[in-house]
Amino acid sequence: MNNEFYHSSFKLAVVGGGQLGRMLIQEALNYNISIHVLDPDENAPCKEICTSFITGSLTDENTVFSFGKDKQLVTIEIEHVSAEALKKLEASGIPVYPQPHLLEMIQDKGAQKQFYRENGIPTADFYLVNSKNEIADYKDQFPFFQKLRKGGYDGRGVQLLNSPDDLSAAFDSPSLLEKPVDFIKEISVIVARNTKGETTYFPVVECEFNPIANLVEFLFAPADVSKEIEKNAIEIAVKVAEKMKIVGLLAVEMFVTKDGKVLVNEVAPRPHNSGHHTIEANITSQYEQHLRAILGLPLGSTEMIRPAVMVNLLGEEGYSGEAVYDGLEEVMKIKGAFVHLYGKKKTKPFRKMGHVTLLADTLEEAKANAILVKNKLKVVSKITQNI
Amino acid sequence: MNNEFYHSSFKLAVVGGGQLGRMLIQEALNYNISIHVLDPDENAPCKEICTSFITGSLTDENTVFSFGKDKQLVTIEIEHVSAEALKKLEASGIPVYPQPHLLEMIQDKGAQKQFYRENGIPTADFYLVNSKNEIADYKDQFPFFQKLRKGGYDGRGVQLLNSPDDLSAAFDSPSLLEKPVDFIKEISVIVARNTKGETTYFPVVECEFNPIANLVEFLFAPADVSKEIEKNAIEIAVKVAEKMKIVGLLAVEMFVTKDGKVLVNEVAPRPHNSGHHTIEANITSQYEQHLRAILGLPLGSTEMIRPAVMVNLLGEEGYSGEAVYDGLEEVMKIKGAFVHLYGKKKTKPFRKMGHVTLLADTLEEAKANAILVKNKLKVVSKITQNI
């Protein structure tokens, strides 16, 4: 199917039209790949640059199936989509990558953890419960993070249960009880595996989260970890991808513990926030690598060109409405600052509006410039609103 | 006008919708810039990725004026457009960059050469004639290149007159008689000048032309020239841009003669084939720099990241029709090969269908890979036609 992917008769369906899809399209343009997008938001970041755009629910089985059924290949840019629809598309003979059964497993945080356990992948200890009542069975083992098995996203559906006293506030739904990890760093490795089973991985990166929004705020590439931890992290990430036999990208987020262990936190089977910097910092970007993987093409070199720091541009607190990028010109003066705005018309607190990647000769220089960006560039709105 | 260029209410008009416009849009996406395009070809490379597209003649005054009159800023991606329309747009208060009077001067090869002479810019000796008859006045000074003052393009409208015997075949139109230059290299420097008069230049590159098609086939960055020639070339290029007071890019193509002189051949007031490699090889690409210049933003660093060779993908002789990129997968295996297909459905002999940039640690390695690309990747068509 793939050797003439550059003809307009070859239609690649992307379920989801956010910034990850947009950056995927930006790379796809270099290969003439026609990308067709489904998203519920009629102003989604992909809207104006994809070959065709359909407004519709990502979780509605019929909508997703209808969208995909006349395409030659289907992929996703967000996990929260109808796995049932993707299974039906796959059953009808259309290649769907990542494979729907993997997506379904990853959508269920409980099944995902069981997969790690069954495959000898190091991860934090956990229990699965079906309701609030069952949590009491583990009352001698608090504290726990309680995570809803399904539907959580960017920190939603997650809470800390410190002691049995917190039981009244617990979610009364199937959930995962996970022992908190005493970690010193959060790192990520993005693995790509193509239809031929070939794999590559991007160098280990380090993520710093915004503590309020639970979103990646800074990313450092390469990560400041020992050779041993680096090797360990890569081995674990590649092992997860190979055990899953996934086709496409798999972003493996991991904790480095105080005692030097590497534990898998969670995975995302798609381009990931921890790979934005690869657009400029690596020979092949994660977006191009995803396309190569799902099209059965040779995977590209993931070698780093220069050290990089990525800063997410999150909507400032207190501002909601038409976005204004205050300080943008100042940032454009910084050597090696690569600005990416996501084409979102409206900002709101902590909304991911764009990112800036800083390349420099050393990571220290890139970090210093990232702090400049963080201080100078603010995503605000024309009319201040207290919200 | 420019501080909120990322709002959709800010409309940038690009006259011409070819590959240069396409690559300009690819960079503009990172800044949310809405680009509106006019091109006579309803399948032009910009069509699917611009904010709006109008099919129409670039040389028809009314068409170009109507297209531009509701935009906030107008630029071009090809010189062969109605300068009259652009002058009217400018007179109506819309900024047009490059400035229409410069475009008009550059469109006229005679006026362009006189500009060099008047400003002390080294260039090959020349005479201007209005008709075939007047050429005889210079019969003791053959050989000449006869170039039509207006309308020539990519080698069309140019011929060598070796001796008075060739007079019968001479063009009977206003033209430039230019003394052939005994050159050893063709080099190019792209200068950017913004609305504030700030300038930057990209490092000197070396162009190798396809002798049949008179199109750039290979480009080497940096150029293999002495420090003195490099310095001289940069000084000349910057001087041309500053004397013109151009806003936007100016690609200055120059000859290096056997005796080490640098002579200006011609200029292009727009992104140029000799700057394609800057997308990956330099911190700021020529396309982004053009946007920065015309929007009055700070110009970016033009520092090279790695040595690069650019190979133009020209349609193979003997093939015409729906394009097939034979050998593309082989090229995608080469480390540091960046493929750019221009979204043109149909190939024909020597049509510019795309380019590949090769980055490597050394220029020699990049050259070796460029030769691999040249040998492996052929733009053919499904049905062979003898034409």
Image (cartoon, coloured by chain):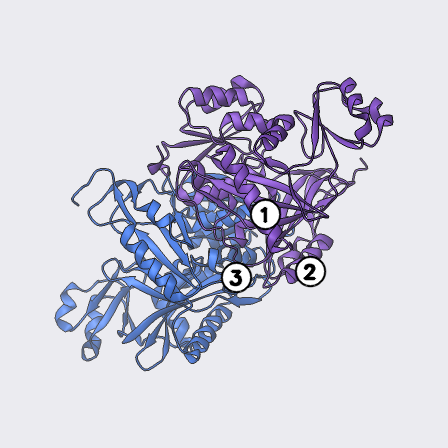
Chain colours: A purple, B blue
Amino acid type shown at disc 2: Ala
Q: Which residue is mark 2?
A: A368
Q: From this viewpoint, which residue is outermost toward the left?
A: B165
Residue A246 point in image, percent of width and height: 49, 34
As drawn, the label of residue B1 is none
SS label for mark 1 = helix
Determine which quarter of the picture holds residue A59.
Answer: top right
Mark 2 crowdedness (10 Å alpha carbons): few <14, some 14-19, many ≥20: few
Residue B131 point in image, percent of width and height: 23, 66
SS label for mark 2 = helix
Q: Which residue is mark 1?
A: A232
A47 above or below B310? Answer: above
Give whichever of B218, B173 is nearer the camera.
B218
Amino acid type shown at disc 1: Asn
Mark 1 crowdedness (10 Å alpha carbons): few <14, some 14-19, many ≥20: some
Say which residue appears at 17% left-offset and 45% top-offset: B387
Residue A343 point in image, percent of width and height: 59, 41
Q: Which residue is mark 3?
A: B247
Amino acid type shown at disc 3: Val
Chain containing mark 1: A
